[in-house]
Amino acid sequence: MEATPPEKSQMEDNWSHLIKSIHRRLIDPWKHPTFILYFFGIVVVIGCFGVWWPILFVYPNKNLSDNEKMSAVAGSLYTLFIGIAATATTDHIIGLKSKNEKSLAMFFIICSVAVGVCGLIAAVLTFKVTDATDQSPRYALDIAAFGLVLALVLWWTANARNCNLQDTSRPDATLGGDPDADLSGNLAGIIH
């Protein structure tokens, strides 16, 4: 039986830790209604208002070509998802508590760069329209939709451990009793 070199074992442990950490960050928030309601209600519905607007009011406009409609939605999508990805990555990096999370930080940075590239490609394709048969806006819309999904996953995983969005007591919170009740005891013997 051949022994595993320590470097290989450590490398496998590092990859295993990264994969488990991402998995936990994708699954754990489902246990917290506050997180889910915040994500869908605030981030997706209200935060994406700039995308809902062209979908609801530009798409029904019969005076615009399909390319113009797709360009409007794609433009709204790529400006939105770049902002979401940038804030999610920054939030995560600022919140790092240990050096063991360097690989997770790198994952976020790489995904943010991918989101940025999607945004750049979508922007170029949105403004490249040459005629009514040009498929650039369709490709821009597809790339922008992919970028938005990736950015939302980044936001989700970056905020998975945000204690303000969890429905559990903080470990340093005082437990039990009425917080408005008078304190019992006195300072006799303590203060001279």
Image (spheres, rainbow, N blue to C red):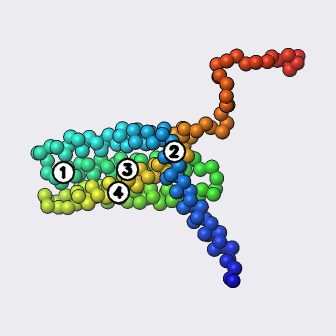
Q: Position of residue 160 (x, y in %)?
A: 52, 47
- Distance, label 4 to label 3, CA atoms, is 9 Å
30 up-or-down from 22: above or below: above
Is there any visible trace of residue 105 in the rendered image? no
Instruction: Tell me the element at label 2.
Output: helix
Q: Which three-letter amino acid code belongs to the residue tagged 2? A: Lys
Q: Which residue is mark 3?
A: 81
Q: Nearer the viewer, residue 63 or 183?
A: 183
Q: Which residue is mark 1?
A: 68
User: Which circle, 1 or 2, is nearer the viewer?
Assistant: 2
User: Which circle, 3 or 2, is nearer the viewer?
Assistant: 2
Residue located farthest toward the bottom when viewing the structure as drawn = 1
Say whether disc 4 or disc 3 marks the residue closer to the N-terminus.
Answer: 3
Say whether disc 3 or disc 2 marks the residue closer to the N-terminus.
Answer: 2
Callout 1 touching callout 2 (CB < 8 Å): no
Callout 4 touching callout 2 (CB < 8 Å): no
Q: Which residue is mark 4?
A: 146
Q: Position of residue 79 (x, y in %)?
A: 34, 48
Residue beneath the point at 59% across and 50% down? 96
- Distance, label 1 to label 4, CA atoms, is 20 Å
Q: Is residue 15 left or right of residue 120?
A: right
Callout 3 touching callout 2 (CB < 8 Å): no
Residue beneath the point at 54% across and 40% down? 166
User: Which circle, 4 or 3, is nearer the viewer?
Assistant: 4
Q: Which residue is mark 2?
A: 31
Question: Where the C terminus falls, by quadrant?
Answer: top right
Q: Position of residue 156 (x, y in %)?
A: 47, 49
- Distance, label 4 to label 2, CA atoms, is 26 Å
Say whether disc 1 or disc 4 marks the residue closer to the N-terminus.
Answer: 1
Q: Which three-letter amino acid code belongs to the residue tagged 4? A: Phe
